Amino acid sequence: MGLVLVASTAIAQQEDVIDRIAAVVDTSIILESDLRAQEQFLALNNRIDPNTPGLRDQVLQTMINERLFIAKAVEDSVVVTDEEVQQQLDAAIQQRVMQFGSEAKLEEMYKMPISRIRREYRDEMRKSLLSQRLQQQRFGSASIGRFEVEQFFNTYHDSLPPVPDEVQISRIVVTPHANEKTKAEARLRAQLILDSLHAGADFVALAKRYSEDPGTTAQGGDLGLVRRGQFVKEFESAVFSLSDGEISRIVETQFGYHIIQLIARLGDAVHARHILIRIPKTHEGDSTAIALLDSLKTVALANHNFADLAKQFSEDKETNLIGGSLGTVDLDQLDKSWSADVSPLKDDEISKPFRVAVGNSYGYQIILMKKRITAHTMSLDTDYPKIETLALNYKRNADYLKWIEELRKSIYWKISN
C-alpha cells in the first residue's frame, strides 16, 4: 500500500522534470513525472542505476498494466468502500511517519501538510485497492490438481531449487514477571506524572522527559493517527473512551503503565499521545521463568505431550493455540540468536531455556526439535507441498500473462512518441 506514497515522494524531489504524457490507457494518462518517479523508486529498492537500459520500458509497461486493471475494475463494477480507502491510506501514512520519524518530517519530505497528503493520494489509493480487488477476484481462488503438479514436476524438475537444511520445531515461551515492589514503584512514578499533568504541566514536555517508549519519546509521545484494532486491548479501550484533549487515568498493559491524551478522534481512528513507564523486570522474575521452563522440559521428556504444555503455559500468542508449532523453518533463516541452542538438537530433543526477544522486551523459551530435514533434491514423495506451491504459482503467472494480453486487446492504450 505504501508504493503510491513512496513513489510520490520522488515526484516532490524532481521538480525539474518537464511533464508530458508518456502513455494513455482508456481514459487515464501516465505523466512523464509519474514514470520517472516510479523508475527512481524501483532503482532505489533494488539498488540499481536508474539509467539502466530497459528500466524505463519495464516500469512503463507495469504502469500500463496497472491502469488496465483499473479500467477493467470499473468495467466490471468492482467497488471499494470509502472506509476501506481511508483505512489503507491511514495505514500507509502511519507507516511513512514511522519511517521518517515524525509527521513534521513527513510533511517536510512531501512539502505539504498531512491533511493535504490525505487529499492528494486518496484517489491513488482507491485505484490501487480496485486493482488488488480485481486480481483477487480473478486469481484468489485458483487451485491445481495432482495431475497438473506431477506434469509440472516432470517438465521442470531439473531446474527446481534444492531443498535446504530444514527443521520442524515448536516452542514454549515464558516472560519474566515483575514483583509487587517494582510494579508499585513504577505506578508511583506514573502517578506523580499524572498529578503534574492535572496541575497544568505540558504533556509533550513530560513525555519527552519521562516516557520510556523509544519510538515516540522524541515526538512528545505522539502516536500519529491509528485505526481501531491496532492497539492492545487495554490501551484501545482507554483511548477510545476519551474526549478530545482529555487525559486518561493510569492504564496498565503488557508494556507497562500508560498515561494517554487524546488529541482528536476521526471516525474509527484516533490521534493520541502517551507517556509510558515500564515495569522493570527483576533477576527473581528471570529465575522463576527459567525454573518453570526447566520443569516443563522435564515433564515433556517424561512423555507428556509438548503441544499440550505449550497450549497451557506458553505466552507466545501467535503459537500457543497451535501447540507452539513454528512449522518447517529453513535452518539458515532461523534467528541467529537461536542458533547455538537449536542447531545441535537431534530429533525429539528439547533445548535448555534461553533468552529470546519478545516484542520490545524479552522472555525465555525452550525449543522442541520435532524433525531435522537434511538438504536434498526435490521429489514428489518427500516435497509434494513445496512442488504444489511452485506449480500453482507457475499456473497463476501463466494465467496472469494471458489475462494481460486479453486486456491489452480489449482496452485502448497507447504509448506516446
Image (tube, rainbow, N blue to C red):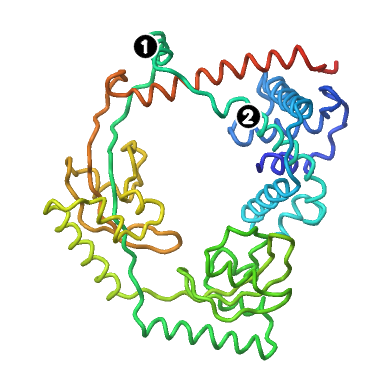
Q: Which of marks 1 and 2 is in front?
A: 2
Number of marks in the rendered image: 2
- Where residue 139 appears, x then y in whole percent? 58, 25
- Residue at mark 2: 137
Q: Which residue is at a point 62% across and 55% down the rendered structure image? A: 98
Quarter placement of the N terminus: top right
Q: In which quarter of the image is residue 229?
A: bottom right
Quarter placement of the C terminus: top right
Q: Is residue 27 above or below residue 150?
A: below
Asked if labels 2 and 1 touch by Cβ distance under 8 angstroms, the answer is no
- Where residue 244 appears, x then y in whole percent? 73, 73
The answer to whether residue 237 is left or right of residue 51 is left
Q: Disc 1 versus disc 2: distance between alpha carbons?
A: 33 Å
Could you tell me which secondary element the residue under label 2 belongs to?
helix
The three-letter amino acid code for the residue at tag 1 is Asp
Q: Nearer the viewer, residue 273 or 214?
A: 273
Q: Dot 1: within a 10 Å radius of its alpha carbon, few (fewer than 14), some, or many (20 or more) residues?
A: few
Q: Nearer the viewer, residue 253 or 362?
A: 253
- Residue at mark 1: 158
Q: In which quarter of the image is residue 258?
A: bottom right
Q: In this view, does 195 lie above or below 17?
A: below
